[in-house]
Amino acid sequence: MSERHGESDFLAAYDPREYDPVSVTVDVVALTIRDGGLHVLLVRRGRPPFEGMWALPGGFVHGVRDAEDLPDAAVRELAEETGLSAEGGALDRVHLEQLGTYGAPGRDPRMRVISVAYLAFAPELPDPRAGGDAADAAWTPVGALGLGAAGEQRPGTTRRLAFDHARILSDGLERGRSKLEYTPLATAFCAAEFTIPELRAVYEAVWGEELHAGNFHRKVLSVPGFVESTGATSDRGGRKGGPRPRLYRAGDARLLHPALLRPSSEEEIR
Amino acid sequence: MSERHGESDFLAAYDPREYDPVSVTVDVVALTIRDGGLHVLLVRRGRPPFEGMWALPGGFVHGVRDAEDLPDAAVRELAEETGLSAEGGALDRVHLEQLGTYGAPGRDPRMRVISVAYLAFAPELPDPRAGGDAADAAWTPVGALGLGAAGEQRPGTTRRLAFDHARILSDGLERGRSKLEYTPLATAFCAAEFTIPELRAVYEAVWGEELHAGNFHRKVLSVPGFVESTGATSDRGGRKGGPRPRLYRAGDARLLHPALLRPSSEEEIR
DNA sequence: CTATGTTCTTCTCATAGCGAGATGAACTCA
DNA sequence: TGAGTTCATCTCGCTATGAGAAGAACATAG
């Protein structure tokens, strides 16, 4: 606390370095569903440190000059890396929420950096184009990253993540899996109108396990405000046959009650 | 992104101000149960800004000089303000978790400050003594703060909170209420050995509503790993009569399955 | 066109979990 | 001693869920 002197004349010219400033970044865990699998947006670093490795899109928060709020910084970084502009409306259906803040000393070899991580859920978006100082940008299947339960990457994984981004991504995935249980978040991965089998495919991709089609159907329709019918029917059936499923849109519920719990939850309780 | 030049020579002498640094604080929402009601630890500010108003205990993170991790900073601030030392073991039974990060421009009138909020759950602790630059410190009943659902304080409340701390406290309370549902966190508010009526009192204090004693009893004993019996019996009955309840200690479960859902959750779903 | 396999949607049935209430025993206090 | 309170357990009815079955609609191969 010995650094905290001079507060009484705070209206005078102020030197922020007295308060031991650090740099603050935002990193975004952007998730989407592609080809029936869960994908995360990654960029390949074009500069040291960790040059050539893959990382979550992110960058420094505009702190004093042109100060911006943290969610705005996350949207800005996401837009810069994907090539989609927030003004264009392409990011309108993207759900954004804060994931957590990571500030262990040494997590950035250059200097003290504290990173505020955000979690984004999006319906299928176009391929990104590399922007900023990224050498490349791509939607990557999360299964190919070899993430362990403790947030580490298994040996032999080709795409190694920079900084502590494997831990951040792992936390984001667990948050997403959990939020699917008690919020209608899965609809954020779908188009404006979707079928119940499509919604089930979202759950199966994020949770990584198959669900009982009949029980899932009954459950989705019984939870108040989860989905509402459009009255219309999809123009084609399943890809290997079957009748044309009906179309729904997201309802007005903010929480699912009762929740839609994932089946596997007996071993990892202790 | 125009600020991001010179990354290639990061091994040379480095000026953090190039990266638009901001100051980072930690604030702690420390909750406990006293006299059957939920209390939060507040300090009265002895200096501007917001001099004389109440605030969450917190302070600047040691950023570059004597760099510390964020949870360590939270424990340090909590120890400084309560007069309890982490080494003494008094804070051993305190559960600490990150709540969220608040960084809206203008939230501190002095300068750009980003605050990482932590949430602490503690069994009954002694009265704090004011430390650091706090003029006073006290456990305060949360009901006396007039917090609205949107994180604002109702007009007429005497103890007004500085900065955006009403919002942070409101978020912390909602997090705590929610975590009681699906984690054994309520045991963190109890002593090492406790009775089921005591555990029920924790739920009733945090949720602000009475629970059905019989059903609560059945539920706690039926969830695997929530509590385990000590075989002993409390030395006295309820304060107004009744048999001596049995004693339990916390079990080894990290999640409650099935969850212990609060009754009121029909209106605030939409 | 026909046959086969797939998928959507709606059933049935058994079991588990929960809200509400009741009951008897143990205890405090007047 | 009597009245009131609380602990602990039980019953009853309803809801939710897991597992399986079945019919109808559709795609595809032959």
Image: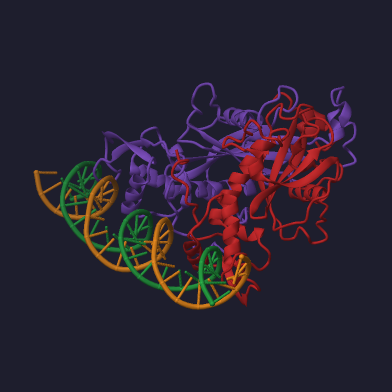
Chain colours: A purple, B red, C orange, D green
For residue A3, side relative to residue A214 (left or right): right
- Quarter of the image for the N terminus of chain A: give it: top right
Which is more toward the observer, A200 or C6?
Answer: A200
Query: Is residue A122 depicted above or below B29 in this figure?
Result: above
Nearest the viewer among A77 and B113 is: B113
Where is residue B224 shown, x and y percent of the image? 52, 67
Tell me the residue at 63%/46% (across/down): A168
Q: What is the x, y in percent for residue B75?
A: 77, 51
Residue B91 or residue D1, whichever sits in front: D1
Indicate the quadrant containing the C terminus of chain A: top left, top right, bottom left or bottom right.
bottom right
A81 is higher (above) or lower (below) than C26: above
Q: Percent position (x, y) of residue A84?
A: 53, 26
Q: Total label count?
A: 0
Return the x and y of residue A245 as percentages of the image width and height: 28, 41
Q: Is residue D14 above or below residue A14?
A: below
Say if residue A128 shows up in the picture.
yes
**Quarter-wise, where is residue A232 in the image?**
top left
In the rendered structure, the answer to whether residue B89 lies left or right of residue B222 reads right
